[in-house]
Image (tube, rainbow, N blue to C red):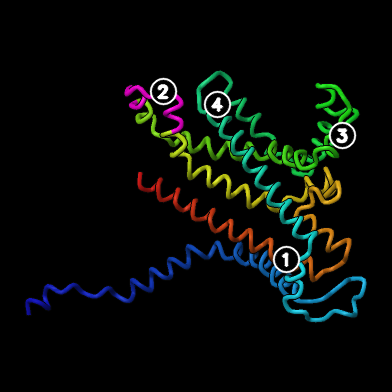
């Protein structure tokens, strides 16, 4: 009798039903957005998967046939697509690395108090708000133009920067636009650093370089990873700068995967090959996004434990 009296009573079924209903009530406002996202993103991706298994050239519309994975084999073995993949890696890595370095420098400067800091911060954020196609046109005509461009106007000469240094021209444009994004992420990381710990290190005799190398950089590691991963997700799909500034040239010097997909789709009219290349780009993006989500969840756990 004592055991029965002390045994906890089972949870009522009514409460469980009520809690499940409350969860669905909270999630119901999100369903329209979820349905819209599925229609806009997942259904076209399924169509792309289907097209990637078809041998279909728009110039021969009546000769479409199922080819299985042949388009993927062509994409992975074609020399132009391999060169486009290498250019994609170089352009993405170059833009991400340089924008992270410049973003870190600017974040450290903006973390200090000085007169007009708010105005300076607003001005530094502005390039990220410019539309990519407008930024590419600005750099192509106002900066790189050999006749009236800013660089030749300041330093003299008539160098055609786009033709002479095509990769550097594209990377510089992307760095200019994405440095503010990296700066904001790293500035948030710097402002979350404990000032008491830094003051204690100064009292113990640590100089500015030691504090930066042994305390600030380890603290910013996750923010640096987050900036690199998010930047890679966006920059791997760069099309505007390549199309506007170099159009993939000279030759195939700056032809990346998105631009090569465009050429395959609208110049060669090979819909199956273009779809297969698009699927590969999506898979690579998902892999990078998975790591980005892990870093974001790690940051949330760190903030929750403080």
Is residue 146 shown in magenta? no
From the viewer's perspective, tell me whether residue 41 is left or right of residue 106. right
Q: Earlier in the sequence, mark 2 or mark 4?
A: 4
Q: Callout 1 environment at 10 Å: few (<14), some (14 to 19), or many (20+)?
A: some
3 or 1: tag closer to the N-terminus: 1
Front: mark 1 or 4? 1
Locate residue 80, reporting x and y percent.
80, 59
Closer to viewer: mark 4 or mark 3: 3
Q: Quadrant of residue 273?
A: bottom right
How far, Cα to Cα, is label 3 from label 1? 34 Å
Q: Earlier in the sequence, mark 1 or mark 2?
A: 1
Q: Which residue is mark 3?
A: 160
As helix, strand or loop, the secondary structure at mark 4 comes to helix
Label 4, on which residue?
109
Q: What is the CA distance from the residue labelled 2 to the residue labelled 3? A: 45 Å
| Residue in the image at 75% along x and 72% along y | 52
Q: Earlier in the sequence, mark 4 or mark 3?
A: 4
**Residue 204 in the image: above or below residue 125:** above
- How far, Cα to Cα, is label 1 from label 4? 45 Å
State the extent of the magenta-drawn residues as a range: 200-213
Badge 2 crowding class, 10 Å Cα cut-off, few under 14, some 14 to 19, many 20 or more, is few
- C-beta proximity under 8 Å, tags 1 and 2: no
Q: Who is closer to the viewer here, 67 or 269?
A: 67
């Amino acid at each position: 009798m004592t055991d029965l009296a002390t045994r906890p009573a089972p949870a009522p079924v009514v409460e469980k039903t009520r809690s499940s209903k409350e969860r669905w009530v909270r999630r119901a406002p999100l369903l329209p957005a979820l349905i819209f996202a599925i229609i806009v993103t997942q259904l076209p991706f399924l169509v792309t998967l289907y097209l990637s298994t078809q041998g279909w050239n728009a110039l021969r519309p009546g000769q479409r046939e199922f080819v299985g994975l042949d388009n993927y084999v062509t994409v992975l073995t074609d020399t132009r697509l391999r060169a486009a993949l290498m250019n994609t890696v170089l352009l993405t890595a170059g833009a991400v690395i340089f924008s992270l370095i410049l973003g870190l420098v600017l974040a450290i400067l903006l973390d200090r108090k000085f007169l007009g800091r708010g105005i300076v911060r607003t001005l530094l954020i502005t390039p990220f708000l410019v539309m990519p196609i407008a930024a590419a046109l600005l750099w192509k005509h106002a900066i790189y133009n050999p006749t009236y461009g800013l660089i030749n106007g300041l330093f003299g000469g008539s160098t055609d920067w786009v033709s002479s240094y095509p990769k550097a021209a594209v990377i510089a444009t992307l760095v200019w636009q994405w440095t503010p994004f990296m700066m904001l992420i790293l500035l948030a990381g710097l402002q979350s650093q404990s000032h008491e710990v830094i003051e204690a290190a100064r009292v113990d005799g640590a100089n500015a370089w030691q504090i930066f190398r042994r305390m600030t950089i380890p603290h910013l590691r996750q923010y640096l990873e987050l900036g690199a991963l998010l930047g890679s997700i966006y920059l791997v799909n760069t099309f505007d700068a390549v199309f506007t500034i170099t159009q993939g040239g000279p030759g195939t010097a700056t032809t990346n995967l998105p631009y090569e997909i465009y050429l395959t789709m609208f110049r060669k009219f090979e819909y199956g090959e273009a779809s297969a290349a698009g699927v590969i780009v999506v898979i690579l993006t998902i892999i990078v996004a998975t790591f980005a989500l892990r870093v974001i969840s790690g940051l949330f756990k760190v903030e929750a434990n403080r």
